[in-house]
Structure formats: structure tokens, C-alpha cells
Image (spheres, grey):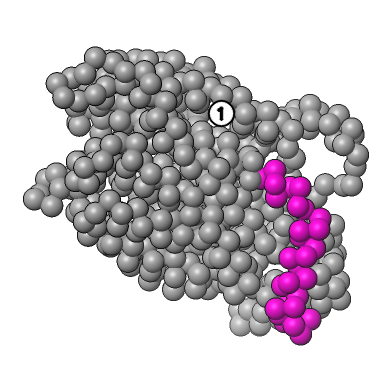
């Protein structure tokens, strides 16, 4: 925890009221949608100063979450980048192979529920480790599949393992982060997804069809880095935020009972918000998967791009994504979360035509700026979800809303591929060609409108504090006395530590 955070906590009352919505009527809430969308125009801090606010432990938490999220994306996109090779190996159509993508998206919600509840109850570390162990086993398994049914079965199981990681990574990286730096760090964290896609694109070019094993070495390689990520996480403690919550549960004398009480309070007070988050994440996942999963296929099938040209285009697009996520995440701290998302969707919609109808290599520029917008909007999401989520179930809510949104959007590539086959082009030899660009353009236009509308009507709690002192749900479930006792004990411990350091210095 930074010194500024400790100072503010020492000077504040033990129990505080969290930044959370009041019980207002639907009419009054609707009337605030325009007024609350107005950018707060907060002072733009120096980003270097924001980065300097994180202490060593907070940076380590960020990096372990970032690396895990990066490799999560790498492993997911291995299928997207080898669709044609998989189709040849298993003698199936492109649409049938995209079910391997769809199954992963569908089963990720199962993993988010299991591992999300485990991380909120037992801590962030061990669910994180188990997730990565499963990654290793199932990514290796994919590389050894001999039949189409085996491929689908392994990818479905992989979806369960994959689903538990996002909420844990976000909570680990962000819940101890200083409030002023959250927007920037959120944008940086989310770009682990784009960075993973970039790495997958590069390694696919290096490993796919460069040996007698065809596409398989890409999956075998994908199983290796999680070993290092596991070792990294084992060297770190639990986050301070989780330690505080665990201490409150212990102070009450019934850890499991208190945890269950917290769940009842969260469901009673926030059920409508949870539904909203799932719907919002469905739109965001339609936006990312709809713009990315079938795009390499469009470039090769419709516009006859060579493998090298596809690689260059994808690399540039992901550089745009990484830039957009970081920049817009930072800007959301100034202009607000909702406003930043809506602006990115409007610009992204305006860029759809050049993104999908440019047949020359000039499409690289459109790809850069389109993914700048897509991942720019996504850069706001980790901290936006964290701020909206009930404190006691932060990992569960962030992960499950994200993965249930994935479930709703799981058929994105299959939908685009199926509809695209209704718009045939003249074949190239024995290869059938389709107008995938037309379908992607129309599909994404509808998604952008949906995300804009849902973001407009939704809430925003920018600046919400994550400690138990500011969590009304925890106080209601565990009792204010238990919360105050833990906070008072922490305060005394910090003061004793400070006095000891002063004595040693003297």
C-alpha cells in the first residue's frame, strides 16, 4: 500500500460510507443519465507520477496478473490462428472448427463461477495456481488431439480452466492499486489480451507448418510459460484487500458463515446490477470477438492476403489495441468511464467501412485504429467492473459477468462464418470464397449501437474505495463491530511499526 493511501486511512474514520448508488426511483435515475455522462474533467495527472505511486508489491501484483492474462489470450487465439490447418487435419469446414472457439467461450462461465467463488473465499493465490496447472495439461492435450471429437472435448475443458483466470487476475492487479492510478493501470492490464494476441500471431508464424508436426508445436509451446507464471505467483502473498476481508471473517468467528452471509447481502442488494454487468459484457465480447476472430480468415479468403501480409496486419492491429487500451484507460480517469467507452464506440463504428472493405495492404492503417477503439473501450473495463462489483465477491462478479458475457457472445465467429457463406464470391481454384467483410461490418455496427445504449443507461462509481472500511455490504453481513475491530488493530499495528522504525533510526 502506498504512503498516501496509508495516510488517508489513518486520518479517516474507522467506518465510512462507500461510493455506491442511493435507493432512487427509476424516473429519477433515468433523469441522471445525461447529467452523469458529462465528463468530470478531473485534473490530468502526469502518468509517470501515477506509475510512481505503486510500491514494489503492487507492481508485482500487476505484473503477475498481466502475464497471466496475456497467456490466457495467447492460448485462446491459437485456435483462431490455425482454423484452416485444423480444418485440413480433421477434414472439417471452417464453421465446424470455429465450434472449438465457441465451446471455449461457452464453458468459461463454469470456470469463472467455480474459481471466482474459491478466490473470494480462500484467497487469490491457490485458485490462480490451479488455473495455470490446468492450462498446461489442456494446452498439451490439444496439441495431441487426433480426432475432431477429441479436439472439441479438450477445448471445452480448456474453457472451464480459462474461465477462472480473468477475475482473479483483475483483482490481484487492481484491488491494492492507488485510486488515482487505477484508470492507467486498468488500461495497461487489459492490454495483456492484445499482447497475448500479438504473441500468438508472431509464434503462429514461427511454429505453424514449419516442422513436420504442422500446427501442433504452437499448442505445445503454449503449455510452457504458465510454469513460470505459477512460480511467480507462489512468491507473492495475498492482496491487502483480501487479507482485510479474511480478518473480518475471522473476527466474527465463522469464516464460512460470514462468507455465505456476504453472498446473501450481495444478491439481495445487487442482483439487478449483476444482470446489467452480464449484458454489458456480452456486448463487449461481441465487439472484440466479432472484430478479431474471423478477421484473419477474411484477409486470406476474401482478399487473398499472404500469410506474411496477414501477420503484419495482425501485429499492427494489436499495436493499435495496446496503445488504445492504455491511452483510453488513462483518459477514463479524467473524462469518466462511461463517456470514454461511448466515444470509442462511435469512432470505432465510423472506421468499420475501411476496416472491412479495403482490399489492399492499406487496410493496415484501418486495422490499427479500429483495434485502438475496440481495445480502448476495453481498457476501461477492468477497473469499471471492479468499481461496480460488491466488495466481498469482487473476483466472482468480475470474472463471472465477463465470462457469462462470453457465453452469450460465444457464437460470434460461428455466426459470422455461417452468414458469410450466404454471400459467395468466385472460387479460387478449389477454395470457396465468401464476403466475410460485409458480414463483419454489419455485425459490428449492431454491436456498437448496443454497447453505446447499454453504457449510457448504466451506472458508474469512479473513485470507489475497495477497503472493508468503505464496504457497507461487509458491515451488514459481518457486523460493524467486527469491521471496526480489524481496522483498529491494523491502525495500531502500523503505528507500532512506525514507532519502532523511528526508534531504530534514532
Q: Where is residue 419, by image quadrant?
A: top left
Query: Magenta span has 271?
Result: yes
Would you say 500 lies left or right of 327 here? right
What residue is shown at x 41% (from left), y 36% (from top)? 414
Toward the left, the furthest residue is 212
- Name the residue tied to disc 1: 447
Secondary structure under tag 1 reads helix
Residue 244 percent coordinates (x, y):
69, 72
Compared across the picture, whether 281 is left or right of 130 comes to right
Q: Position of residue 140 (x, y in %)?
A: 27, 62
State the residue at coordinates (20%, 31%).
307
109 w.r.t. 483: above or below? above
Left or right: residue 245 compared with residue 152: right
Residue at coordinates 65% horizontally, 59% vertically from top-left? 394
**Quarter the N terminus occupies:** bottom right
Q: Which residues are magenta?
A: 248-277
**From where the camera sits, is residue 11 visible?**
no
Q: Is residue 173 magenta?
A: no
Amino acid at each position: 500500500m502506498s504512503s498516501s493511501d496509508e495516510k488517508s486511512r489513518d486520518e479517516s474514520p474507522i467506518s465510512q460510507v462507500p461510493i455506491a448508488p442511493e435507493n432512487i426511483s427509476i424516473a429519477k435515475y433515468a433523469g441522471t443519465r445525461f447529467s452523469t455522462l458529462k465528463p468530470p474533467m478531473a485534473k490530468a495527472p502526469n502518468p509517470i507520477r501515477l506509475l510512481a505511486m505503486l510500491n514494489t508489491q503492487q507492481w508485482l501484483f500487476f505484473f503477475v496478473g498481466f502475464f497471466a492474462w496475456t497467456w490466457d489470450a495467447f492460448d485462446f487465439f491459437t485456435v483462431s490462428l490455425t482454423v484452416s490447418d485444423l480444418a485440413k487435419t480433421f477434414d472439417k469446414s471452417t464453421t465446424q472448427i470455429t465450434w472449438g472457439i465457441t465451446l471455449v467461450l461457452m464453458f468459461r462461465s463454469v470456470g469463472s463461477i467455480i474459481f471466482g467463488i474459491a478466490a473470494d473465499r480462500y484467497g487469490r493465490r491457490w485458485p490462480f495456481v490451479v488455473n495455470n496447472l490446468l492450462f498446461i495439461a489442456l494446452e498439451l492435450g490439444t496439441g495431441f488431439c487426433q480426432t475432431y471429437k477429441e479436439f472439441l472435448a479438450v477445448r471445452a475443458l480448456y474453457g472451464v480452466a480459462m474461465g477462472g483466470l480473468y477475475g482473479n487476475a483483475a483483482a490481484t492487479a487492481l484491488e491494492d492499486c492507488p485510486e488515482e492510478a487505477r484508470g492507467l493501470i486498468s488500461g495497461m492490464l487489459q492490454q495483456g489480451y492484445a499482447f497475448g494476441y500479438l504473441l500468438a500471431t508472431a509464434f503462429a508464424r514461427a511454429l505453424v507448418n514449419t516442422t513436420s508436426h504442422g500446427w501442433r508445436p504452437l499448442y505445445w509451446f503454449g503449455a510452457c510459460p504458465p510454469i513460470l507464471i505459477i512460480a511467480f505467483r507462489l512468491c507473492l502473498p495475498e492482496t491487502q484487500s483480501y487479507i482485510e476481508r479474511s480478518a473480518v471473517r475471522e473476527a466474527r468467528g465463522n469464516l464460512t458463515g460470514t462468507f455465505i452471509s456476504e453472498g446473501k447481502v450481495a444478491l439481495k442488494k445487487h442482483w439487478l446490477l449483476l444482470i446489467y454487468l452480464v449484458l454489458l459484457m456480452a456486448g463487449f465480447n461481441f465487439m472484440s470477438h466479432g472484430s478479431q476472430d474471423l478477421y484473419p480468415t477474411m484477409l486470406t479468403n476474401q482478399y487473398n492476403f499472404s500469410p506474411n501480409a496477414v501477420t503484419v496486419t495482425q501485429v499492427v492491429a494489436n499495436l493499435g489495441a495496446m496503445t488504445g487500451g492504455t491511452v483510453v484507460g488513462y483518459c477514463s480517469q479524467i473524462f469518466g468511464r462511461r463517456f470514454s467507452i461511448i466515444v470509442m464506440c462511435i469512432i470505432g463504428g465510423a472506421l468499420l467501412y475501411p476496416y472491412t472493405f479495403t482490399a489492399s495492404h492499406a487496410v493496415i492503417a484501418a486495422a490499427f485504429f479500429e483495434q485502438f477503439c475496440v481495445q480502448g473501450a476495453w481498457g476501461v473495463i477492468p477497473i469499471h467492473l471492479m468499481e461496480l462489483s460488491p466488495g466481498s465477491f469482487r473476483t466472482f462478479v468480475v470474472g463471472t459477468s465477463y465470462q457469462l458475457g462470453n457465453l452469450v457472445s460465444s457464437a460470434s465467429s460461428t455466426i459470422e462464418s455461417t452468414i458469410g457463406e450466404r454471400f459467395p464470391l468466385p472460387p479460387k481454384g478449389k477454395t470457396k470464397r465468401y464476403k466475410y467483410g460485409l458480414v463483419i461490418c454489419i455485425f459490428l455496427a449492431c454491436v456498437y449501437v448496443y454497447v453505446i445504449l447499454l453504457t449510457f443507461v448504466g451506472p458508474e462509481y469512479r473513485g470507489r474505495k475497495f477497503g472493508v472500511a468503505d464496504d457497507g455490504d461487509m458491515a451488514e453481513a459481518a457486523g460493524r463491530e467486527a469491521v471496526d475491530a480489524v481496522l483498529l488493530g491494523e491502525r495500531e499495528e502500523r503505528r507500532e511499526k512506525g514507532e519502532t522504525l523511528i526508534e531504530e533510526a534514532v
